Image (cartoon, helix red, strand yellow):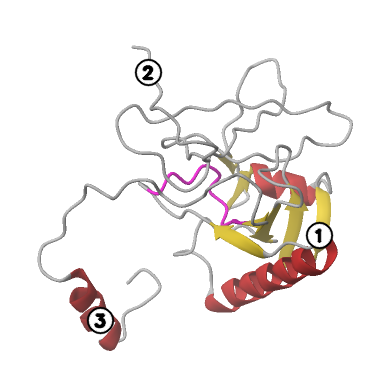
Amino acid sequence: MARTPAPPSPRGIHLSDGGCGESVPAPHGKGPGTSRTHRRATSPPALVRLLWFRLGRETGRVPSAVPVAGSGRVDCTFCRLIREDAARWVAHGPVACAFSPLDPLAPGHTLVVPTRHYADVFDTPPDVLAATTALVQRVAGAMRAALDASGVNILSASGPGSEQSVPHLHLHVVPRWADDGISTWPTGRSEHHVAGDPGARLAELLAGGQHHGG
């Protein structure tokens, strides 16, 4: 059954519903990547529209992550780019790296990821997460210094229900200017309800020493 796209907000950027993905660079020598975007039919658009990357194989869309037989590891789109040195690098380190997406939302839009595979914020060790966010800060500073950006948006999704597309932790750093004509702020509110005071429940859990996904 065909989906009817929700009306977009003026010049806004929309996040696709679950399963649609990141805009990432095509491997060198493979030709340009292609993209596919799906929009939610009923719920309001959220943070940012992200584009699905295809590797250009005749068999069609490649899964964003697949187990590697006998290796005990998962091979995802970002892992392949890092392993094959096929990205358009902004920074490349042993713990975290940054590269340009194929279809940037703004000039200088950069993806920052852990160099090793970690699925999401729940899976990532605190020291790796700290190094990754430190690189986010460095990239943001470079955007202000080199591109005269007045600010940045830092966008990420982790886990089921978040509309994460590539199961490798990644943060979008999007440079912003006062007159750039885009909006990444949600235009609606969640329809999910939680019993009691959500903030108090979180505070109680954290005070008990549980963290990093419980």
Location of residue 89 with respect to 9 vertically, above or below? below
Relative side of 33 to 21, left or right:
right
Going by the numbered disc 3, the residue's amino acid type is Ala
> Which tag, 2 or 3, sits closer to the chain's start?
2
In this view, the residue farthest toward the top is 1
Question: Counting other residues with Cα less than 10 Å from the Cα at mark 2, is it few (<14), some (14-19), or many (20 or more)?
Answer: few
Question: Would you say the residues marked 1 and 2 are in contact, meaning their CB atoms lie under 8 Å apart?
Answer: no
Residue beneath disc 3:
203
In this view, the residue farthest toward the left is 196
Residue at left offset 21%, top offset 82%: 204
Going by the numbered disc 2, the residue's amino acid type is Arg
Going by the numbered disc 1, the residue's amino acid type is Leu
> Which tag, 1 or 3, sits closer to the chain's start?
1
Q: Secondary structure at mark 2?
A: loop
Residue at left offset 37%, top offset 18%: 3
Q: Secondary structure at mark 1?
A: helix
Quadrant containing the C terminus is bottom left
Residue beneath disc 1:
147
